[in-house]
Each structure stands twice: as C-alpha cells, then as structure tokens.
Amino acid sequence: MSEGKKTHWIFWPFVALWRLVTWILELTGRLVAVILGVVFMVVGAILSVTVVGAFIGVPLFLFGGLLIFRGLF
C-alpha cells in the first residue's frame, strides 16, 4: 500500500482513518455482492422451473453466479 508520497505527520491520523473507512466499504461491497448473487441464483432457479420463466431464470441464475464469483475474488 505504499503510494510513494510521504504524508506529513500532522495529517497521518486523517489518512489512517480514511484508509480504514475505504477498507470497510470495500468489504461491505463484496458482502453485498455475494448476498445479491445468492438471491439472484435462488430467484433464477425458482423461475427456471417453468418453461416460460426459464428465459429469464437461466440468465438471472448465471448473473448471480458471476456476482458471487466477483464478490469472492
């Protein structure tokens, strides 16, 4: 995480707080992506039971899988 810039000692607490906030937001963003992926996969699987719903259910299921993959990696 070295940016190459030196932070003045008086601003160091603000920089540390900013990095903590961005880390928390990244973590919750990934968690939300995984949760939404699971929801989309469940809804896609339920819609795929019917022939008419399969046209929307299968892509929704695949999109949910991609969201989970993106959230984990």
Image (cartoon, rainbow, N blue to C red):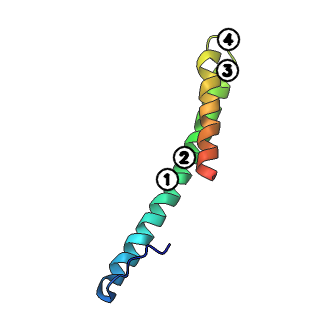
Left or right side of 63 for 1:
left
Residue type for callout 1: Gly
For numbered disc 1, what is the local secondary structure? helix
Element at label 3: loop
What residue would you read off at disc 4? 51
Tag of residue 29: 1
Say which mark, if any, is on residue 8. none
How far separated are the C-alphas under marks 3 and 4?
7 Å
User: Residue visible at 66% across and 25% down?
Assistant: 46
Tell me which label, 1 or 3, sits earlier in the chain. Answer: 1
Q: Are marks 4 and 2 in contact (CB under 8 Å)?
A: no
Crowdedness near tag 4: few (<14), some (14–19) or many (≥20) residues, C-alpha within 10 Å: few
Considering only order in the chain, which callout, 3 or 2, is on the residue closer to the N terminus? 2
Name which residue type carries label 4.
Val
Q: Position of residue 37 (x, y in %)?
A: 59, 40
4 or 1: mark nearer the eye: 1
Residue wearing tag 2: 33
Left or right of residue 60, residue 25 in this image: left
**Vertical arrangement, residue 15 with respect to residue 45, above or below:** below
